[in-house]
Image: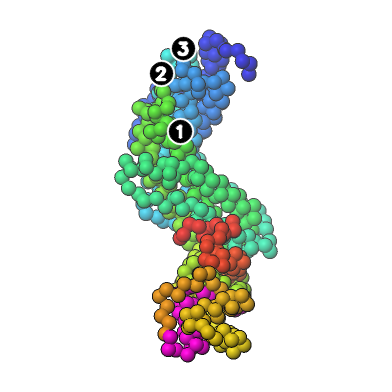
Amino acid sequence: MSDTYISREQFVALLSDKAAALLSLAQLVTSRPEYAAKQSPGSWTRPLLGDFHAQAARVEELVDAYGARRNLTWRRLRTCVAGIKLFSDVGYKLLHIRLFAPKYRLAPVTPDFSSATESAVGFACRMVHAFSLRLMAQAQELSLPLTLPASSRDTFAETLPSGSLPDDCDRESLRSVEETVVYLATAVLNAVEEGGFLRVQQSEKVQYQSLVPEVINEEDIRRLEDTFHGLQARYDTYVADTNLESVDSDLPVLRGHITVVYHLLEIATSLCHFYERHLSARASAAAAGSSGTLIDPAETLQVLVEYAIRFAEIYTEKTKELCRGMLGRYSVPGSVEVPIPRYRGFHVRPTTLIARIVRHYGAEVRMRLDDEAYDASIPLDLFRANEKLNAEKRREMTSEAVQLLADEPLAEGRSNEELVRAVARRLFEQQKLILYDRALSLEGVSISPELPPEQCVVECLQKLLNAGKIDLELEVMVRFEGDRRVLMDIALLAEQNYGEDDFGNNLALPPELAYLRSGR
């Protein structure tokens, strides 16, 4: 584009040609009463909305190329075109869901998804109709010709006969399909955790404005939308049309749930984009000639939260149940040996993270220490292992302290308090003891001057161990048994010292364990 300005007459002539098809569609839906019906959007079809979207996209691209967004004369028309483009796309996707939902084999849910979809279709079509009315008014104001041949309603009819083509292609027999199903199920579970923002509380719609963009925003929704689109693509590439899909009835159900979540997130992305860009308090204050009087922000938020977000969350939870069942069927049992956590053994953080991994996959995993088994999905059960570990620490620490006192004359000329510190520091120098309190404060540890030195040292060291001021590193391995996919994540967590350093400070977890950050 050149830096010179185009004249109004030139631009009107250009749009009279390039926007003719869009104006013809707007004329069709604004001149026929059936398209304005609030409760029955049946006259709106995918061919009509698809054509609306295509023509609006062409006009929007053209007016944007000439700077209409920053021009007082043309920005209102540009807003109408953008509204038609967005809501025709949303409406098309909703009609797609309505048409194909029966083939997705979706689990029954409450509230009823079908009636909620119908209500959302009505909203989207009303918005296209409202923007079309505003577009016609803007076209008249800007001297764009309206004596156009109106499109025929019959052109956009969508009468589809029932039935389908015969399924007569050979099924592929792939040895790696089971591995792909496990990968896919795992990826879905991770995506569900990534979409934690979907779990918003349904409340009065007036309160939904506080959710955008702090809790719900276009960036997060679009990222999750891309994730589910990738899951759908992976299924279609590696699982669809295989022998396994024909014998496992849950697989097409999984595909249907992934697909409906993807489409719901597409709709949520568009609605959130429109609200953030045009309807939020910030956007409305900045945009002259906005669509604030044309669209009710509360209604837009209601469709966003109560339809798109709500049902995306409901179906992700249903998908999670499916995936956990599949992991149980397709998982490969195994075992892995890992060292115990260096900092204070199986205390709150490591046991919580291990249990979260196990619950994430819905698997059954056991931890074995010597001859005892622990349920790895229950932090308190894992915490019990510390009883055995601490008993071993006390025995070893007592043995080391007694041996040190026998080898070195540390007790000579020292009070019992001084002796305790001397023994602790000497064992620390020999790397047999960990000091979390380098000053080794004995506050709260009663020391009797009458006790024999050796007994005093042993008792005080055990009290310091119980108080968490000192520790002993044991070279002890535990064995986890269960699904190999779960065990891989536990082994990875152990490699990261269970998410903490030697002094109990939190360490960043690797990307493969990002789902643990959600806290669920």
In the rendered image, which residue does mark 2 sit on? Answer: 137
**Amino acid under label 2?**
Ala
Residue 331 shows up from this direction: no
> How many angstroms separate mark 3 from mark 2 (CA)?
10 Å
Residue 52 spot, x, y in % from top left = 50, 29
Q: Which mark is residue 143?
A: 3
The residue tagged with tag 3: helix, strand or loop? loop
Q: Is residue 155 above or below residue 428?
A: above
**Amino acid under label 3?**
Ser
Q: Quadrant of the N terminus?
A: top right
Identify the residue shown where x is 55% and y is 86%.
412
> How many angstroms separate mark 2 from mark 1 (CA)?
23 Å
The residue tagged with tag 2: helix, strand or loop? helix
Number of marks present in the image shown:
3
Q: Residues within 10 Å of mark 2 (few under 14, many from 20)?
A: some
Residue 372 spot, x, y in % from top left = 52, 83
Identify the residue shown where x is 56% and y is 67%.
502
130 horizontally vs 357: left or right: left
Q: Is residue 316 above or below residue 179?
A: above
Instruction: Tell me which label, 2 or 1, sits earlier in the chain.
Output: 2
61 horizontally vs 197: left or right: right
**Amino acid under label 1?**
Arg
The residue tagged with tag 1: helix, strand or loop? helix
The magenta region covers 449-478
Q: Which mark is residue 393?
A: none
Query: Which image quadrant is residue 210 in?
Result: top left
In the rendered image, which residue does mark 1 sit on? Answer: 277
